[in-house]
Amino acid sequence: IVRNWVKPWGTLFMSLLKMIAVPLVLFSLVAGVASLNDTSKIGRIGGKTIGLYLGTTAIAITIGLVIVNIVNPGGGISPELVEKLSAQYADKVGTRVASAEQLGGQTILQQMVNAIVPTNPFAALSNANMLHVVFFAVMLGIALTRLKSAEHVIKVFQLLSDAIIEMVMLICRKLIFAPLCEAE
């Protein structure tokens, strides 16, 4: 009976958090990048961010490989079950091989660019494709930094960022959905 009472509140809380995720990332990044006022600072921060990303990715891959070699998942599966699963998912393997072959002519850099750069930023925003949203927000922030007469637009993004952060506070504190959100 407790589950029936708690579940709607949990669903509402998660929906509210999902609702503000994309605007929070978009407005905060645009305001943050545009407030740097110097594109060389952006390059330094970007370089450090990429280095941190590559370092943590290498650590995660190493941990994953060590755990897989220790645990040996799937090692105890019978040959009959392997055959059954192979037959069951054979058609999916074919489609994945075909899509991998399409990418086969591209370099890793081309694949990365295709994965990062959105062809339609509005679709990225509506689909909550965060990598595309981040790229678009950074590019928009850089563009605003380079414009001489963009102070008012930058202030709008800063105000929108502050408004979204206030929404987070309302969701977490004022609506008492998450007492653990106390950050002050």
Image (cartoon, grey):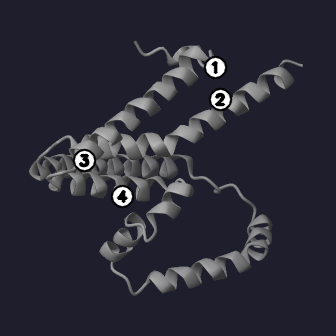
**Vertical arrangement, residue 122 with respect to residue 156, above or below:** below
Residue underneath mark 1:
177
When asked about the image quadrant of residue 157, the answer is top left
Which amino acid is tagged 4?
A: Phe
Q: Are marks 4 and 1 in contact (CB under 8 Å)?
A: no
Q: Residue at x 46, y 25 (%)?
A: 166
Is residue 158 shown left or right of residue 122? Answer: left
Q: Earlier in the sequence, mark 4 or mark 2?
A: 2
Residue underneath mark 2:
13
Separation of residues labelled 4 and 3 (CA atoms): 17 Å
Q: Earlier in the sequence, mark 3 or mark 2?
A: 2
If the image is split into quadrants, where does the C terminus sit?
Answer: top left
Q: Position of residue 12 (x, y in %)?
A: 70, 31
If the image is split into quadrants, where does the N terminus sit?
Answer: top right
Separation of residues labelled 1 and 2 (CA atoms): 6 Å
Q: Residue at x 38, y 52 (%)?
A: 134
Residue underneath mark 4:
136
Q: Earlier in the sequence, mark 1 or mark 3?
A: 3
Q: Position of residue 24 (x, y in %)?
A: 44, 39
